[in-house]
Image (cartoon, rainbow, N blue to C red):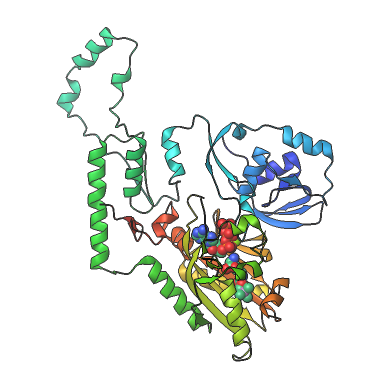
Amino acid sequence: MEKKPLDSLISKNGLWVSRKGYLHEIKSCEASLKSLRITMSCGEVIMVRNSRSSRAARSLRNHKFHKPCKRCCIPEEKIREFSAQVSREEATVVVRNVSSSRFNSYTSAIPYMEVPVGIPARQQACAIETPAPVSSVITAPKQARPSVAQAFVPDTRVKEQKVKKSTDHSFLKPAKAQFSQSQKNRILSLLGPGEMISFSKEKRSFAELESTLVAERKKDIREMYESSRENLLGKLERMITGFFVDMGFLEVKSPILIPFEYMERMGVGEDEKLSEQIFLFGDNMCLRPMLAPGLYNHLRKFDNVLPDPVRIFEIGPCYRKESDGNSHLEEFTMLNFCQMGSNCTRENLEYLIKELLQFLGIEFQIVADSCMVYGDTIDVMYKNMELSSAVVGPVPMDMDWGINKPWIGAGFGLERLLKAKHGFKNIKRAARSESYYNGVSINL
Ligand code: ATP
Ligand code: 9VF
Ligand code: MG
C-alpha cells in the first residue's frame, strides 16, 4: 500500500509529532514545491520536507507520541481520537530496539524500528541493507533461446507431467535458487557498492553466485591497488582539509579522550539518555562523542591571538553508543568548522555549507530542526539522512566555555558524506572497517 505524504497526513489529523515526541496542534501549514512550513498552536514554526517515509510521517501514520504539548492546549477529545486510530502500520512486530536518544536530535524519542507482520524474508534482508539509489542492478543471466528446430519439437515431458498431476503447475515455472538468510546476507555483503539483487528472480545457485561476486570484488580491489591506492575516508579528510585551509580556517586536532566533565558542561551529562550514549573511560574520562568541547577551548584561547573573525575546523574520530542501522556507526569521523566574531550570519553559514557540498559534488537540502545541546539547528539533509547539524550562535552555554562573541558552526559526518556520494546502502561500507575497503567487501 502506498504511503501517504506528510501533507495529507497533516490534513487528516491537524496534528504534528515533534522529534522529541510531543504532540502539537497545527495552526496553519503552507506548502511549497517539496517542503511544508507548519505553524503550531503553541507558536512553534518548522520547515520540513513533504516526505512519505520521514520520521514525522511514520509517527503520524502510527499515531505514536510521547505527550501532548502543553502550550498547544489540544482538546482532550482530539487527542483521544488520534490515539484511538489504528493504522495498518500499527500491526507490526518490534524487531529491533534503537538507542533512546541522540546528541543532536530528538529522532529517537520513538525508539523502535518495525517490520510489518508477514513481511517476506527477501524484504527483511533489506533491514540489513535497505535499497539505495540504484547505480546498477544485477539480474539473472538470460536463458539461451531455443533454436527454431528445438522450438518445434513437441515437449512430451511437460504433457506427461500435466496428465499425471493436473493441479500442480509448479514445474511450469523456471527453477529458482533458494537462499537461506545467512546466504542472502553473504551475497548482499559481496555486492559492489550501489548494486542490488533480486533473490526471487535469481536462478544461480548460492555457490555459483558467491564465486562470481568474489571474483568481481577481487578484481575491484586489485584495480584500486593498480590505480589510486587511496582510502576513501582518508582522501575525503584530505580534500575537506584542503578546502577549509584554502578558505582561511585553521586546522585543529584536539584530544579524543576527554574529561567527562566536558560533556556535563555541554549539557549532555544532565540528560540521562544522551549520557548513556557515551563511552566512559576510567573514572572521569570518556571518548569524545562530538568535537565541540575541543573547539570551544581553541576558540577561547585563540580569541586574543588571531585576527577577527577566528576561523577553525577539526576532522577526527567521535564515538557514540548506537544501535540504529544503516546510517549510524559507533566510531565515526566528524568535521566541525566554526567561525567566531564578525560575519557570523546564517547566510554566511549556508554559503560555507553550500560551497563545501558543491566542492564534494553532493546534493543536499536544508531543513530546520532542534537539539538538546544547541536548541535550534539548521540540518543539512541528503534524502532522509542528516549530513550535518549547523548552528548560528551565540547560545547560553557559551558562557560556561568563556565565549562571549557571535559564532556559526556546523558538524558533518564524513562516513555519511561517503554513503551519499557513493550510494552505499549501509554506512558500514564507508566506516573504519576490517570487512570493507572503499565500500568493497574484503572477506574474499
Ligand atoms: P542523528 O540524529 O542522525 O543520529 P545527530 O543529530 O545526533 O544525528 P549530530 O550530533 O548533529 O548528530 O552530529 C553531527 C553529524 O555527525 C550528523 O549530522 C551526522 O552526519 C554525524 N553523525 C552523528 N552521529 C553519527 C553516527 N552515530 N554515525 C555516523 N555519523 C554520525
Ligand atoms: C554545530 C555538531 C560550539 C562554536 C565550538 C561549534 C558547532 C554543530 C554541532 C555536533 C557537535 N555546533 N553536535 O559548534 O559548530 O560536535 O557538537 Si562551537
Ligand atoms: Mg544533528
Q: Residue at x 44, y 42 (%)?
A: 126
Residue 250: % across, % down: 52, 83
- Residue 401: x and y, percent? 66, 77
Q: Would residue 349 be visible to someone looking at this image?
A: no
The residue lying at 83 percent from left, 38 percent from top is: 76
- Evaluate whether residue 73 shows in this view: yes
* Residue nearest the viewer, comparing 259 with 352: 259
The x and y percentages for residue 342 are 67, 84
The answer to whether residue 229 is left or right of residue 417 is left
Q: In this view, does 218 lie to the left or right of 291?
A: left
Residue that appears at 50% across and 69% down: 358
What residue is shown at x 20% (from left), y 15% (from top)? 157
State the image quarter where residue 102 is shown.
bottom right
Position of residue 440 in the picture relative to residue 160 (left or right): right
Asked where in the image residue 222 lies, by quadrant, the reply is bottom left
Q: 128 or 350: which is nearer to us? A: 128
The residue positioned farthest toward the left in the image shown:
149
Quadrant of ligand 1 in image = bottom right
The answer to whether residue 255 is above or below residue 277 is: below
Q: Which residue lies furthest to the front in this view?
A: 283
Question: Which quadrant of the view contains residue 349?
Answer: bottom right
The N terminus: image quadrant: top right
> As displayed, is residue 167 above or below residue 243?
above
Callout count: 0
Q: In the rendering, at what x and y percent does residue 375 appear?
A: 70, 64
